[in-house]
Image: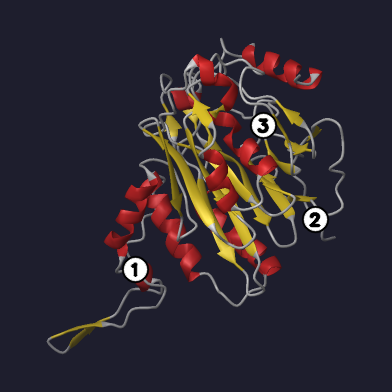
């Protein structure tokens, strides 16, 4: 049976259904960096048009999770006991992870895919072998240690088209995952079929489908981190006006294809001789290139990404995860100071999910 806490949370979410409509942002960006000590660092931004009110949650080992079936009700889907403890960010007070890492270093997140994600047509008779789309990351992180295990596991379950009332429809997402060895995959549901793709570049954004992004990389083969020599025509020399000539043409807008290419080349250009803990700092600098300034993506009142109320999209939070030292970092729109959760030494044998509020009051280091 689902815990009383989980039932109360799902009930609270359901009560919001009249106030909210589909709001998951189109502007999430994620990537993976490698340290010179065989560690890996994952970075990710989360953009939204209304407050997610995210907290850090800790799912303990052996916690009994209740799958959401085809009717959208908790307990009518596949139930499972957590093999691994996991921590990360939730949304709307729900007992699920939309970004996170488990105790053995499997890390990843859910990214919006509203024009491509179409889940399996699970008949009611098979509901007990299915989960809701927004449970995919929770299921993966609490069950598996490697991406190969995830590949095998997801072929044995169904991800259904159930509606989450807070979205007034299915949560259309894809999942990016990286394990401690640096292997990466993308899990999508396209035209009601499961598609699992090895991710050779470690980068992921939103629609179109992942294969389109990989094919698009060749269009930017001219980009390089190396500075260009002056152009010489008929003996006349024309020098670039400043440094940065190698990245001339790097997309700078907030569209998903542009963010994919920008992340790809910034990660590829990152120094490779840094330890994993140094790459954590580097990841924050790369993430800064995807932080949406307030007002830059302004939404009309009838746009669902603004909750139907208008306004603008912001980077609500960004996360960095050190898969070697098992540290999960997060900073929010309101508080740019980095907050950290150390998985080593944490109590993962609790009976219930632990919720840790994020400090959303900006803090400063006083120098005098």
Sort mark 3 into few (<14), some (14-19) or many (20+) by Cα contacts within 10 Å: many
Image point (75%, 22%), residue name:
6
* Closer to the eye: label 3 or 1: 3
Position in image of residue 38 (x %, y %):
64, 70
The one of 264 and 2 positioned closer to us in this rendering = 2
Which element carries disc 3, helix, strand or loop?
Answer: loop
Whole-Å distance between the Cαs marked 3 and 1? 39 Å
Q: Mark 1 points at which residue?
A: 223
Mark 1 vs 2: CB contact within 8 A: no
The one of 33 and 65 positioned closer to us in this rendering = 65
Q: Name the residue under label 2.
A: 365
Which element carries disc 2, helix, strand or loop?
Answer: loop
Mark 3 vs 2: CB contact within 8 A: no
When asked about the image quadrant of residue 244, the answer is bottom left
Of the two numbered discs 3 and 2 on the same chain, state the one appearing first in sequence.
3
Of the two numbered discs 1 and 2 on the same chain, state the one appearing first in sequence.
1
For the N terminus, the quadrant is top right
Q: Mark 3 points at which residue?
A: 96
Of the two numbered discs 3 and 1 on the same chain, state the one appearing first in sequence.
3
Which element carries disc 1, helix, strand or loop?
Answer: loop
| Residue 353 seen anywhere in this rendered image of the structure | yes
The answer to whether 315 appears left or right of 80 in the picture is left
Mark 3 vs 1: CB contact within 8 A: no
When asked about the image quadrant of residue 274, the answer is bottom right
């Amino acid at each position: 049976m689902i815990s009383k806490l989980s039932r109360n949370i799902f009930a609270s979410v359901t009560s919001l259904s009249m106030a909210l409509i589909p709001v998951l942002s189109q502007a999430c960006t994620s990537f993976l960096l490698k340290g010179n000590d065989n560690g890996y660092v994952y970075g990710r931004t989360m953009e939204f048009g209304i407050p997610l009110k995210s907290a850090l949650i800790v799912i303990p080992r052996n916690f009994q999770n209740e799958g959401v079936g085809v009717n959208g009700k908790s307990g009518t889907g596949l139930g499972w006991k957590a093999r691994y403890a996991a921590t990360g960010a939730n949304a709307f007070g729900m007992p699920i992870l939309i970004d996170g890492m488990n105790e053995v270093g499997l890390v990843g997140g859910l990214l919006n895919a509203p024009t491509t994600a179409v889940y399996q047509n699970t008949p009611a008779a098979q509901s007990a072998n299915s989960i809701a789309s927004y449970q995919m990351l929770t299921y993966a992180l609490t069950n598996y240690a490697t991406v190969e295990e995830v590949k095998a596991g997801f072929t044995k379950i169904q991800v259904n088209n159930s509606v989450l009332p807070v979205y007034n429809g299915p949560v259309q997402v894809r999942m990016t995952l990286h394990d401690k060895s640096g292997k990466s995959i993308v899990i999508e549901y396209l035209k009601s079929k499961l598609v699992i793709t090895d991710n050779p570049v470690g980068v992921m954004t939103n629609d179109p489908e992942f294969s389109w992004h990989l094919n698009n990389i060749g269009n930017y083969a001219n980009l390089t981190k190396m500075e260009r020599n002056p152009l010489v025509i008929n003996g006349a020399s024309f020098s670039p006006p400043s440094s940065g000539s190698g990245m001339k043409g790097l997309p700078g807008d907030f569209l998903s294809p542009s963010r994919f290419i920008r992340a790809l080349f910034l990660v590829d250009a990152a120094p490779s001789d840094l330890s994993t803990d140094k790459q954590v700092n580097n990841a924050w600098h790369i993430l800064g290139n995807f932080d949406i300034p307030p007002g830059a993506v302004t939404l009309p009142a009838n746009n669902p990404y603004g909750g139907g109320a208008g306004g603008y999209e912001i980077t609500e939070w960004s996360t960095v995860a050190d898969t070697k030292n098992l540290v999960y970092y997060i900073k929010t729109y309101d508080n740019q100071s980095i907050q950290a959760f150390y998985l080593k030494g944490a109590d993962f044998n609790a009976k219930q999910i632990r919720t840790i509020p994020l400090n959303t009051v900006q803090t400063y280091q006083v120098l005098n």
